[in-house]
């Protein structure tokens, strides 16, 4: 074979300036009716560092985001992520504020109220009073002259979960609707945040309530109840400046003391 023949036998459709092959109308028509064919965007989509072509989405598919005014956002987890956007320093600052109440807690959380404290503090308190309550009962029984056998009471966990979670969720809702009815401009998330941090004092006191001395236990629970009640009432007082809401403040104080006495009588009796 000569060199001229070898050059002429090479395919030339890919060379610069070559004329593409003619495609018949039948092939174009048949390709247009292929159901799998879809339009594609060029150049390739590079969003998120991914390579390749991006298929055009229909308008009915939307952008996959929930609109804030839609009721669907209530059941979407992404709607609540903003209330867990807190770091350790912010949480520690709010925990300290709950131990030394000054009435300015709402001003501290105004820009970023969180539900992280509500969930974390409530869950920790549930497991602590259930476990330490059993431990305190064991120490009290060992200290007494009774020879009755001791056993771990699993029902403490169910009672602690029902009482703590119910209190932390329902009580702020009741005060929210009550103050709304009385004409105050309040926020349910801020109430949940404030009441959640008000329970932190009971986490610290639960360690001391294990001491098998009844007088010390009552002293500890009275101090814890007073600190928690003061924290709640001092911060609710900002909503009673324009309206006479003394009854609301007294009710909040009584409920905080009631929770303290319930923890003492049920788990550390």
Image (cartoon, rainbow, N blue to C red):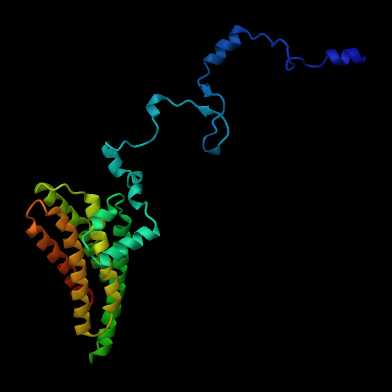
Question: Left or right of 20: which side holds 266?
Answer: left
Specify the farthest residue to the bottom: 145
Location of residue 156 in the rendering, given as x and y in whole percent from the top left corner: 26, 71
Q: Is residue 126 visible?
A: no
**Total tally of numbered discs in the picture:** 0
Identified at 27% across, 36% down, the residue is: 70
Location of residue 94 in the rendering, given as x and y in whole percent from the top left corner: 31, 61
Whether 254 is drawn above or below 182: the answer is below
Question: Left or right of 186: which side holds 2?
Answer: right
Identified at 28% across, 88% down, the residue is: 142
Question: Left or right of 166: which side holds 182?
Answer: left
Between 25 and 226, the one lying in front of the other is 226
Between 236 and 156, the one lying in front of the other is 236
- The part of the image, by quadrant, that contains residue 191 is bottom left
Q: Can residue 176 be seen in this view?
A: yes
Whether 159 is drawn above or below 142: the answer is above
- The part of the image, by quadrant, that contains residue 59 is top left
Whether 125 is drawn above or below 47: the answer is below
Whether 268 is drawn above or below 39: the answer is below
Location of residue 250 in the rendering, given as x and y in whole percent from the top left corner: 10, 63
Identified at 19% across, 84% down, the residue is: 215
Location of residue 12 in the rendering, given as x and y in whole percent from the top left corner: 76, 15
């Amino acid at each position: 074979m000569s060199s001229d023949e070898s050059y002429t036998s090479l395919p030339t459709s890919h060379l610069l300036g070559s004329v593409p092959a003619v495609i018949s109308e039948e092939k174009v028509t048949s390709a247009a009716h292929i159901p799998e064919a879809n339009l594609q965007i060029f150049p390739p989509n590079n969003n998120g560092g991914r390579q390749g072509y991006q298929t055009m989405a229909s308008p009915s598919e939307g952008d996959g985001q929930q609109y804030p005014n839609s009721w669907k956002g209530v059941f979407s987890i992404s709607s609540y992520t903003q209330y867990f956007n807190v770091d350790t320093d912010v949480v520690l600052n709010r925990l300290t504020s709950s131990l030394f109440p000054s009435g300015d807690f709402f001003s501290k959380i105004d820009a970023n109220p969180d539900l992280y404290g509500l969930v974390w503090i409530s869950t920790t308190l549930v497991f602590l009073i259930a476990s330490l309550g059993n431990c305190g009962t064991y120490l009290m029984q060992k200290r007494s002259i009774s020879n009755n056998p001791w056993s771990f009471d699993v029902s403490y966990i169910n009672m602690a979960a029902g009482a703590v979670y119910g209190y932390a969720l329902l009580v702020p809702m009741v005060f929210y609707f009550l103050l709304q009815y009385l004409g105050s401009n309040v926020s349910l998330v801020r109430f949940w945040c404030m009441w959640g941090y008000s329970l932190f004092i009971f986490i610290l006191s639960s360690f001391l309530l294990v001491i098998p001395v009844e007088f010390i236990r009552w002293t500890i629970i009275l101090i814890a109840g007073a600190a928690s009640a003061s924290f709640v009432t001092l911060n609710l007082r900002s909503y009673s400046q324009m309206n006479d809401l003394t009854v609301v403040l007294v009710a909040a104080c009584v409920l905080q003391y009631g929770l303290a006495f319930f923890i003492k009588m049920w788990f550390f009796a």
